[in-house]
Image (spheres, grey):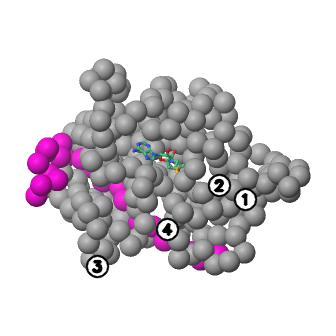
Amino acid sequence: MRNKYHIAFPQENVDHLHQNEVYFHYWKEDPDEKVKLRFHDYAEIYKEPGLYEQLFYERLKCTSPAKISTLLKNALSQSQENISELRVLDFGAGNGMMGEELKTHGVSRLVGIDIVPEAKEATLRDRPGLYDNYYICDFENIDNKTNQNIKAWNCNCLVTVAALGFGDIPPKAFINAFNMIDNNGWIAFNIKETFLDTKDNTGFSKIIKELIFSEYLDIYNLERYRHRVSVGGVHLYYYAIVGRKNTNVPGDFFST
Ligand SMILES: C[S@@+](CC[C@H](N)C(=O)[O-])C[C@H]1O[C@@H](n2cnc3c(N)ncnc32)[C@H](O)[C@@H]1O
């Protein structure tokens, strides 16, 4: 896609800001019409065709969909399974970057989930037909009907890319999505490296660490890699994690 936007990053060093607080300016032709947005103003970003791709994938060199798809494929081959057999729940699907990557690997079904309606609208606009269905819902408080509809897809793989932590998907919602996947299904996600640090005692980090090293998940691949660069050019490292689900996480998981 040809670059349509001028994107300017702050002059001052903003690497101390949380990832969701970092901002940028963009404009189309007239710099006097520049707009300031934070990285997590997803609704506004998705409204502009190609802006998300230009910002995160071209300027900031995000590699995560390609990395996680490749690790998922490798994990499947350890079990003599084929990616074409996967019915994938893409949780935090955004405008379909991970879905597009998975489709090139030939997955059988793709179901998208996001909490922001503009994510679905952008996907239908820019990648029509990519997902078999795309639901806008809050997995922390999912209603019965949507729950049943999504379960009916019998997904055997959950992917969550660049959507855990930093005020995006909370652990409870992630675990509800995990519990939607068939037993023995595949779980693939990424997380900023600091969340696995033993020194990180935030609730989010603790729950994610407990889940990763629990009996509910068998880890097949865990790799540290460069997710993208920051606006200051610093390399941001994440872990890509691919595993196989054993059983559902019980409701009292959060009180343990
Ligand atoms: C950085 S984008 C990643 C999008 C896509 N996975 C990718 O790799 O390009 C994070 C996405 O997570 C979504 N998100 C945030 N909180 C969510 C929640 N509680 N439930 C579902 N999606 C959520 C956002 O709306 C946004 O589309």
Q: Is mark 3 within 8 Å of ligand 1?
A: no
Task: Give neighbour class at mark 4: few <14, some 14-19, many 20+ (Cα, 10 Å).
Answer: few
Where is mark 4, residue-wise?
A: 18
Left of 32 or right of it: where is 51?
left
Q: CA distance from mark 1 to mark 3?
A: 35 Å
The boundaries of the magenta stretch are 232-256
Above/below status of 65 relative to 8: above
* Residue 46: % across, % down: 63, 42
Q: Residue at x 26, y 24 (%)?
A: 144
Q: Which mark is residue 25?
A: 1
Image mark count: 4
Q: Earlier in the sequence, mark 1 or mark 2?
A: 1
* Residue 154: % across, % down: 31, 28
What amino acid type is highlighted by mark number 4? His
What amino acid type is highlighted by mark number 2? Leu
Q: Earlier in the sequence, mark 3 or mark 4?
A: 4
Q: CA distance from mark 4 to mark 1?
A: 17 Å
Q: Residue at x 60, y 69 (%)?
A: 229
Residue 118 makes an appearance in the image: yes
Q: Residue at x 53, y 76 (%)?
A: 16
In the rendered image, residue 92 lying in the magenta stretch gets the answer no
Image quarter for residue 164?
Answer: bottom left
In the rendered image, residue 245 lying in the magenta stretch gets the answer yes
Q: Which mark is residue 199?
A: 3
Check the image and name the residue furthest to the right: 30
Q: CA distance from mark 2 to mark 4?
A: 14 Å
Q: Earlier in the sequence, mark 1 or mark 3?
A: 1
Q: Which mark is residue 40?
A: none
Where is mark 2, residue-wise?
A: 37
- The C terminus, quarter of image: bottom left
Image quarter for residue 218?
Answer: bottom left
Depth check, mark 1 against mark 3: the one in front is 1
